[in-house]
Image (cartoon, grey):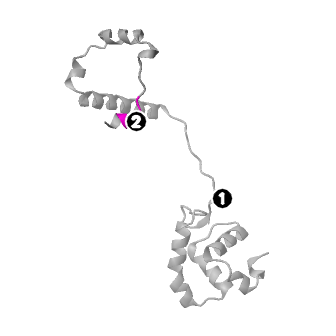
Amino acid sequence: MKLSKMPKDELESYSYVELAEMILKEEKKSETIVDIFKKICKLLELTNEDYENKISDFYTSLTTDKKFIMLEDGTWDLRDHHSSVVNLEMTEDDEEDLTETEEEIEEEMDDMAPEEYHDMDDDAEVDDTDMEDVDDIEEDDLTIIDEDELDD
């Protein structure tokens, strides 16, 4: 049913945000907040004083309700009427920027590392003599400890 055909008492049962949603659905076009609220005031037969006293609260309600979106031209519409397009393609410039960033991060990480790290040779062999003993441990040699025992 069109809003203009609805009885006033039924219209009064809706919040301003619900009426705004109904107006935008019915008209199928974006509108300024002023135009939307003027239409609500006309439907509810509100005075100019009511309009002036309630427009800021209406604005706050629209901005916090996720069903509405403000468009670039300053008009408002329902979010469902608009899609978000995300461009995931990378250009060569983007790849170069990313590579530069990775290199910068690596340099920063090297600067933050302790001196011993810088003295290490990447090809140096690790002393794993202690690890050889791990293979000789039998399951019977292991002991299960309760969490309470760990606190002691």
**48 on left or right of 102:** right
Instruction: Using residue 117 as the reference point, say whether residue 86 is left or right of it.
Output: right
Packing grade of label 2 (10 A; few <14, some 14-19, many >=20) is few
Which residue type carries mark 1?
Asp
Up the image or down, 69 lies above or below 55; here it is above
Location of residue 10 (image quadrant): bottom right
Badge 2 element? helix
Residue at image x 73%, y 70%?
26
Quarter of the image for the C terminus: give it.
top left
Q: Position of residue 86 (x, y in %)?
A: 56, 45
Residue shown at 44%/12% (left/top)? 138
Residue at position x 70%, y 67% in the image: 25
Residue 41 placement (x, y as % from top left):
62, 84
Give the residues drawn in magenta, as a range. Answer: 145-149
Q: Nearer the viewer, residue 146 or 5?
A: 146
Q: Which image quadrant is residue 51 in?
A: bottom right
Which disc, if any, is residue 18? none
Q: Magenta residues: mostly which secondary structure? A: helix
**Which disc is residue 80 wearing?**
1
Mark 1 secondary-structure assignment: helix
Counting residues from the N terminus, which is met first, the one under dot 2 or under dot 1?
1
Does the residue at mark 2 contact the one at mark 1 (Cβ under 8 Å)? no
Q: Which residue is mark 2?
A: 147
Q: Quadrant of residue 23?
A: bottom right
Residue type at mark 2 is Glu
